Structures are given as C-alpha cells and as structure tokens.
Image (cartoon, rainbow, N blue to C red):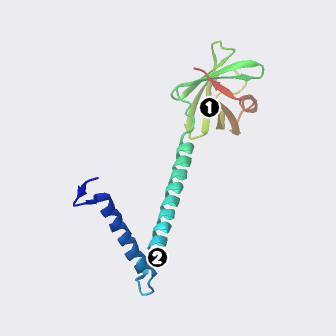
Amino acid sequence: MAIVEGYSTFNDRNLVYEIAEIIIGYILSRPFAPFCFRHTKRFYFNLKISVMKNILTAGLLSFFVLHSSAQLMLKNTQWKGQVMGFELKLDFKEDTIYMYRNMTGPTDMFVFSQSNDTLILTKIRGSGVCPINSKGIYRIETLEYGEKFHFRLINEECPARGGAFTTNPFEKMH
C-alpha cells in the first residue's frame, strides 16, 4: 500500500466503493428510477442463468454428437470369437473380410461395407454352407469401450450364418 499525505490507497478505494454502493442503492430504491436500473441485479442474475443453461446444453449436445460419431470402424482390424464350438477369426481389410475357422487358413471371404453401425457383407468365396453372393446386414453393437462387439441381425439371406454370427461377441485381437 502506498501512503500519500497520510491516507492509504486501500482506504481511498474502500471509501469510493462505499459511496458507489450508497448511490446505487439509492437509485435502485427510488420509484422513479429507470426500468434497467431497478432490475439490474435480477437482469444479470437471469443473464447468468441463461448463459449457464446454454453452456450446459451445448456441452451435452456435443457429448452426444461425439459419442454417436465414435462408431467402431472395422477396417484393418482383427477379431476372434466362439461360434458353434470352434474359434472364428475375422480379419477385416479395406473392403474384404477373411474368415478363419480354428485359426487355420481362410475358409470364407466376404466383401463388406460399413456405414456408422451397420455392416453389409456379401460372400464371394468359401467352403461354408452359405452360397456365394449371399448377403447379410448386421448392426454392430460396441461393447467394453470398443474392445468387443456383437452382431445384431437386420437381414440375412443365409440363416446359418445369421445364427452363428449373432450368438457370441467378438473380441479385438491386438
């Protein structure tokens, strides 16, 4: 604190604040005061509440948008799961899936496309019971923060594959 002619700067500021409070209090208490002066505290309180609501709404909206856009992308990943008593490995490439039974050589091959949580696959080669060019459409249900997923059947031309794929979840291979 600087002392000038026997008064401290701190005390002068307090005096100014006290005078301002008295004047503002007098203005706010007068019936002839303009509308904006009489309701200043309420106006700022309502403004603060409104801003807080907008921030909260924007935060929740962005959370849901980010959460919904954080879909599990299957391109260039490998997954394993138990299907009808044997271990099945799905090796997703750019647009092709290689399916391995009991970790031997690829038994079936599919082309696939993914749009958000929907997977469309078409068999193009293999020795399984499903005919070539049979198509299946599945919804991908993400589990355990993307470490597992479960197929939910939407439409399937080969019932045997639909029953096998939707039985157990698939786990990511690292």
- Specify whether 168 is left or right of 24: right
Residue at the extreme top: 104
State the image coordinates of residue 71 (x, y, percent, origin top left): 56, 38
For the point 77% across and 22% down, the residue is 84
Asked which quadrant contains residue 33, the reply is: bottom left
Residue 108 occupies which quadrant of the picture? top right
Number of other residues with Cα within 10 Å of mark 1, as a class: few under 14, some 14 to 19, many 20 or more? many
Q: What residue type is labelled 1?
A: Thr
Q: Residue 35 carries which label?
A: none
Helix, strand or loop at label 2? It is: loop
Query: Is residue 173 at least partly visible in the picture?
Result: yes
**Percent of width and height locating residue 106:** 62, 16
Q: Which residue matches tag 1? A: 122
Quick check: 156 above or below 103? below
Residue at 37%, 76% (x, y): give it: 23
Q: Residues within 10 Å of mark 2 (few under 14, many from 20)?
A: few
Indicate which disc, 1 or 2, sits on the residue closer to the N terminus.
2
Residue to which mark 2 is pinned: 39
Q: Which amino acid type is marked by label 2?
A: His
